Amino acid sequence: MKMKLKYLLFGVALIGLTSFSNDNLDTKYTTASKRTNTVFQASEGEKLIAKSDCIGCHKLDKKLIGPSYLDIAKKYPSNDKNVAYLSGKIIKGGSGVWGTIPMSAHASLKKNDATSMAKYILSLKK
Ligand code: HEC
């Protein structure tokens, strides 16, 4: 009797465990994708950058033709002055700060959009 009960309990525990871990995986997966969506929607600047040509020269954490966004965020504290400076630079382009390679101008970019981009980049600092 005692043995049978043990087996029964073991079985129940096993079923419980398997379904639990499946649930757990599902939840983890959905929370993770939900989280990415929220972050993505939260940042207008990130969306604008993803739609623009920036990605051809900049990466989040690796230097390409231009400095990585994380390096830019490390160099400039997030304040109004730096946001204004960087949004101006995004529109006008230029060189000499990170090296001799120039950044192309983005003359058709709206000032507001350039500001969102600069704010997003400076928000990346850990
Ligand atoms: C043709 C390649 C290229 C493209 C396209 C490009 N960049 Fe750059 N970016 C650079 C280079 C090169 C630098 C370094 C310029 C320097 O040394 O002054 C730079 C520098 C920057 C800086 C730092 C400026 C500073 O003075 O420290 C920011 C911010 C930036 N880019 C944002 C952007 C954004 C946002 C976009 C898209 C709208 C973009 N870049 C598109 C090449 C590019």
Image (cartoon, rainbow, N blue to C red):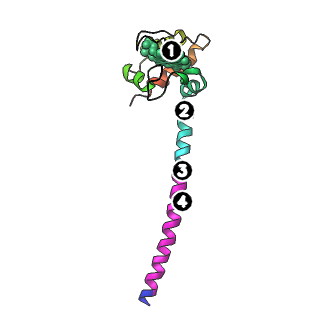
Circles 4 and 3, Cβ within 8 Å, touching? The answer is no
Q: Which residues are magenta?
A: 4-28
Q: Which residue is mark 4?
A: 23
In the image, 54 versus 91, the foreground residue is 54
Q: Earlier in the sequence, mark 4 or mark 3?
A: 4
Residue 17 forms part of the magenta stretch: yes
Q: Earlier in the sequence, mark 2 or mark 3?
A: 3
Cα distance between the residues tagged 4 and 1: 46 Å
Q: Residue at x 58, y 21 (%)?
A: 53
Prevailing secondary structure class for the magenta stretch in the rendered image = helix
Q: Which residue is mark 3?
A: 29
Q: Earlier in the sequence, mark 2 or mark 1?
A: 2
Cα distance between the residues tagged 2 and 3: 20 Å
Q: Secondary structure at mark 2?
A: helix
Q: Which residue is mark 1?
A: 87
Cα distance between the residues tagged 4 and 3: 10 Å
Circles 1 and 3, Cβ within 8 Å, touching? The answer is no
Can residue 92 be seen by looking at this rendering? yes
Cα distance between the residues tagged 2 and 1: 19 Å
Q: Earlier in the sequence, mark 4 or mark 1?
A: 4
In the image, 89 versus 62, the foreground residue is 62
Amino acid type indicated by mark 3: Tyr
The quadrant of the image that shows the C terminus is: top left
